[in-house]
Each structure stands twice: as C-alpha cells, then as structure tokens.
Amino acid sequence: MIGQVMLTAVWAAVAVAWVFVPIMKGADAFFGVPVSEKFMYGPQGRRYLRIYWLLLALFMGGTIASVWLLPPTTIGMVIMDAGVLGVLIAIAVIFCLVRRHQVISPADPVAAVLQPRNRWQYINWPLEGLCLALIAGAWSYFVLSYGSLPPRLVDVSGHLTSIGWVSIGTQLLAQLYVFVLFLLLVMGMAQSAVRLPANASEEYLGLRHRYMRMMVGLFYAMKVTMIAFFGGVVTLLLRAVVTGSDHGILVALVGPMALYWIAVFGALAYYAVKMYRVRAQMRQLAGPGSLERAADHGGWVAGFMYFNPQDPSIWVEKRIGIGYTFNLAHWESWLLLALFISPAFVIPWLASR
C-alpha cells in the first residue's frame, strides 16, 4: 500500500510534467520544432496535440494501473517502464511529423562566444548544507529505529525485505539520488557556453544571467522539497511502524505528500511567470528560436548526439527538439546519463529481492 501510493505520486508528477512537452521550448516552437503560428494554432497543430495527450493518458494511465493491479516484482516494474517507453516513442513520432513543417528563420549573427565559467558558479552552499542535514537526519533516524522494525520489513537475517525496500529503502536512496543529480545539473548549467547576438550583447548577457539564476532557484526549490519529502515520509513512517499506529501510517503518506505538492506547484508558479517574461525579452533581442541552436558548429553525430572534446560544456542546447543534450566527450556527461537511467534498473532489482 505504501509503495503503491508513492509510485502513483511519482508517475502522476511525471505525467503532469509531460503534458507541457509540446510548448516546453517556448512560444515559437511546437514539440521543440520552430513552426509557423498558422500551423501551431491551426487544425493540424491541434490534432497533433490531441493525439499526444490521448497517448499520454493511455500510457501513463496504464502505468499507474499496473502499480495497483500487479505485484511489485520485476515483471510489474518492466510493464511500468514499458508505459514510459510508450510515451517517449509517441513524442518521437509526433516530433518527426511536426519537423516536416519546420520553418527556418535567419538568425542574427553571433558576436561572440563566451567560454564556460567556474562550474561552482551557481552552487548555493547554504542550501546544499540544508539538504545534507535533511539527509543525515533521515538516515540517523532510520539507523536508530532499525532494531525495532517488524518482521514484514526486516527478515530474520537482519536485512530489509522487499516491502522494506519499496517503502523505506528506496526513499532513503532517493534522497542521495536527488542530491547528486541536481548538484551535477547545476554544475552543468555553469559549464554551458554563452553565445551573444551582434546587437545588444551586454543586455542579452544580463537577461541570460537572470534567466539562469531563476532556473537555478527553481532547481533548488525542487531539490530541497524532494529531499525533505522523502525524509519526512521515512521519519513519520518509521515512527508509525514502530508504535504500531495505523493512523500514523496514513499521516506519513498524506502529510508530506500534500506539503510536497503545495511547495512544488508554488515554486513552479513563482518561477515560471518570471522565466517566461525574461525569455520573451531575450527573444526580442536575439530573434525567434535560440542562438545556441542557430549557431551551427561541429561535434554533432547523426544530428542529435554531440561529441566535441574541444567544447568544455557538459551539455549543450539541442540543434532541434526540446531541451539540452550531453557533450559525450566528458566523463561528467556519462555520469549524469547513468544517474538518469539508473532508477529503471535499481528499483526493479530492489523490489525483487
């Protein structure tokens, strides 16, 4: 029951985030592809949007249903992963269809390319310390309560059972995962090269710095909230299990989850409006699309993979599509890639123990 509620919350959050994939790149792109307003807001664009949302509802609905209908074994986890894979395939297919309507607009000339700065530039050390304190508190409480856990969570040999791993162990590991992942993401943001337009370069640089600060602020809001959420669930759940309180178990599930969603949506609402306004000002200076995407340079393999040892950036903006991609010439990129895909293998293995 506990693991099912947790997985349902996670997949629901993923589904909500994927709803905004078609417009994630900005007002001048549809599924990351620069298109005309006539296509984007016309009947064909709306049809693609309805198809995507229908496939998203089917695949993610099936994933959430499998959480409740299938046991937490390897087969159940594989079926959940298949639902996520279905959404990714749907995005890829619609992306290919939309790309046929791509509009190429001439970009303003690039005046200069600023090399990446110190990778620690955007690190907020007080918040990093707060995250470590939250992690240490949850792990300490777990160690102190380990000897009092019931047999359904700890077997006779003193190891966590599959229920113990799903309900408690994965929450503790998730804290470490979130801490390292967001730390590397913020470091990667500082490593990204900056391309300035020929006109109003200083103004553009100032706007981009503000935009990056806002994005870092959103990242830290998500990081602290997620670590506090996992730690709160573990602490309250351990206390309820040790005391044998069914009411305490319900509080451990509902309380942190409610606070988590309030904090997440509050942070998104606060930063999204500001980031959208700054991004609009950047587009007015640099033209439609993205300078990073318009500035064609070497290192691209098959148009979507980037390998350039001479570029110190850990990640670069995709030439076409949504978001960023890794510079596979650096070990930090491979570490980030491994962190992104590791839950798909670690969680099924822990659940099947």
Image (tube, rainbow, N blue to C red):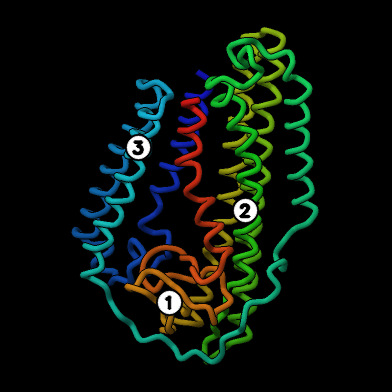
Q: Quadrant of residue 240?
A: top right
Q: Nearer the viewer, residue 316 or 155?
A: 155
Callout 2: few (<14), some (14-19), or many (20+) C-alpha neighbours within 10 Å? Answer: some
Secondary structure type for disc 3: helix
Residue drawn at (68%, 69%) of the image: 119
**Left or right for 1, reference 221:** left
Q: CA distance from mark 1 to mark 2?
A: 24 Å
Secondary structure type for disc 1: helix
Dot placed on the residue nearer the N-terminal end, 1 or 2: 2
Q: Nearer the viewer, residue 299 or 104?
A: 299
**Left or right for 52, reference 250:** left
Q: Nearer the viewer, residue 165 or 179?
A: 165
Tag 3 residue: 60
In the image, residue 304 sits, relative to residue 270, either above or below, namely below
Residue drawn at (58%, 32%) of the image: 170
Dot placed on the residue nearer the N-terminal end, 2 or 3: 3
**Type of amino acid at the residue the image marks with label 3:** Met
Tag 2 residue: 182
**Left or right for 4, reference 248:** left
Callout 1: few (<14), some (14-19), or many (20+) C-alpha neighbours within 10 Å? Answer: some
Mark 1 or 2: the one toward you:
2
